[in-house]
Amino acid sequence: MTLVLVAHGTRDPAGAVVVEEIASLVSARLGGVPVRVAYADVRQPDVTTVLSSISGPAVIVPAFLAAGYHVRVDIPAQVEASGHRDAVITDPIGPALLPALLGRLAEAGWTPGDSVVLAAAGSSDPRALADVRAVATALSHRVGPVTIGYAATATPRIADVVASASGRVAVASWLLAPGLFHRAVVASGAAVVAAPIGAHLRVVEAVLLRYYEARCFQDVA
């Protein structure tokens, strides 16, 4: 049963390297299970292309931090366009990654007392924004008050939030890989900017969990 890891897509080669690294780590944990990479936007191959080359059952795992338009609309549409009739799409991996977010923030130099800003990509889907708010609430239980800034699409923008914060500002990057969005976070003027979550062990475990859940469901069905 092939695992198709679907990322957002970025023109930044470093972002694609991170996605391939995650796929490689997942593949190593799954033994002989084929693992393929697809992109919902910007880069190729897209989900349609990858699924069209797979003859057996497939599990599509969206490597997304929130269930926005790409997860709810684009990926299902690309699956349908492929004509593949034995594929299941899992939930995105975001909810399991709070420990990784905390780890990256600590690695960047956050200290208690910093004003913490959660930087997310942004979305026009209110459900995706609700996902981000839930992460901010969970993060606040560990680091104190957290405000949210967006790199694109939604408001307030990350630079505006950083500018209005008091004291030393530390930004937790709720982003999976380098790219345009993270460059906006770096340019925000914060004293501390965490790296994207990247090929963190928690990401690998979250992908594996989604795969196993879907596989069990298919076996039972």
Image (tube, rainbow, N blue to C red):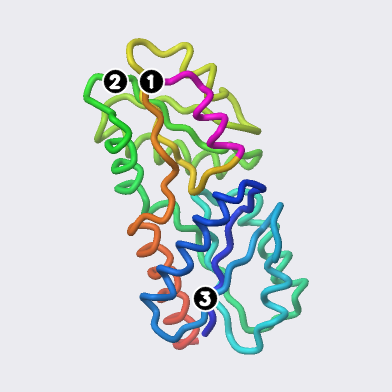
Sequence order check: which comes first, mark 2 or mark 3? Answer: 3
> Marks 1 and 2: which is nearer the front?
1
| Disc 2: which residue | 114
Residue 38 percent across, percent down from the top left: 63, 65
Asked whether disc 2 touches disc 3, contact meaning CB atoms under 8 Å apart, the reply is no
Disc 1 marks a residue whose amino acid type is: Ala
Q: Is residue 55 left or right of residue 182?
A: right
Asked whether disc 1 touches disc 2, contact meaning CB atoms under 8 Å apart, the reply is yes
Disc 2 marks a residue whose amino acid type is: Asp
> Marks 2 and 3: which is nearer the front?
3
The answer to whether 192 is drawn above or below residue 136 in the figure is above
Q: Determine the residue positioned at 45% across, 40% down.
A: 174
Q: Give the range drawn in magenta.
A: 180-191
Sequence order check: which comes first, mark 1 or mark 3? Answer: 3
Q: Is mark 3 on a helix, strand or loop?
A: strand
Disc 3 marks a residue whose amino acid type is: Val
| Disc 3: which residue | 35
Q: Determine the residue positioned at 46% across, 11% down.
A: 164
Q: Residues within 10 Å of mark 1 (few under 14, many from 20)?
A: some
| Disc 1: which residue | 191
Label 1 – label 3 distance at C-alpha: 39 Å
Asked whether disc 1 touches disc 3, contact meaning CB atoms under 8 Å apart, the reply is no
Label 2 – label 3 distance at C-alpha: 40 Å
Residue 21 percent across, percent down from the top left: 46, 62
| Quadrant in the rendering for residue 29 | bottom left
What's the mark number on residue 66? none
Q: In this view, does 115 lie to the left or right of 64?
A: left
Residue 183 percent across, percent down from the top left: 56, 33
User: Is residue 124 found inside the magenta-colored segment of the image?
Assistant: no
Q: Is residue 170 left or right of residue 130?
A: left
